[in-house]
Amino acid sequence: MNKAPILLSLAMLLPLAGTARAEDEHGFWWYQEAKLACMGDVMRLCRGFVPDEDKVRGCMKDKKTQVSESCAQFYPGGSKAN
């Protein structure tokens, strides 16, 4: 199975805590770094909701205690979220 379409879809998502447009709040670099850090968690925890961005955000918010340490740092209260 070709994973490129799935990865491309994920690259367009920001699956974090349901916050409003994190790239506006923190800058484009932060947005790109967050997408890379959380891509594996989206596939592991919320794959069934891709490519619906709102549903992925909701799923990730519901499962925030299960995300990897690299992704968790981008959630509100995480070291990079401040």
Image (cartoon, rainbow, N blue to C red):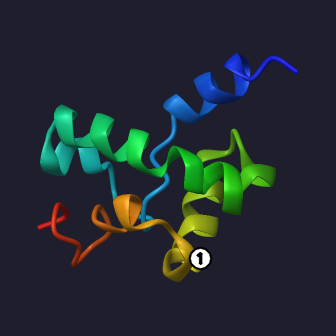
Q: Amino acid at mark 1?
A: Lys
Please name the residue shown 68% across and 45% down the image. Answer: 52
Callout 1 secondary element: loop
Above/below status of 57 relative to 77: above
Give the residue pinned by disc 1: 63
In this rendering, position of residue 66 left or right of residue 24: right
Please name the residue shown 16% across and 51% down the image. Answer: 25
Quadrant assignment for the C terminus: bottom left
In this rendering, position of residue 47 left or right of residue 34: right
Residue 72 locus on image (x, y percent): 37, 68
Residue 48 locus on image (x, y percent): 81, 52
Please name the residue shown 69% across and 39% down the image. Answer: 51
Tell me the quarter of the picture where residue 77 sits.
bottom left
Asked if residue 75 shows in the view, the reply is yes
Above/below status of 12 relative to 46: above
Tell me the quarter of the picture where residue 57 sits.
bottom right
Q: How many marks do you count on the picture? A: 1
Please name the residue shown 40% across and 48% down the image. Answer: 37
Residue 29 locus on image (x, y percent): 18, 34
Asked if residue 19 shows in the view, the reply is no
Quadrant assignment for the N terminus: top right
Residue that lies at the very extreme toward the front in this rendered image: 69
Residue that lies at the very extreme toward the right in this rendered image: 1
- What crowding class fits label 1: few (fewer than 14 Cα within 10 Å), some (14-19), or many (20 or more)? some
Above/below status of 44 relative to 78: above
Q: Nearer the viewer, residue 36 or 81?
A: 36
Q: Nearer the viewer, residue 19 or 46?
A: 46
Above/below status of 48 relative to 27: below
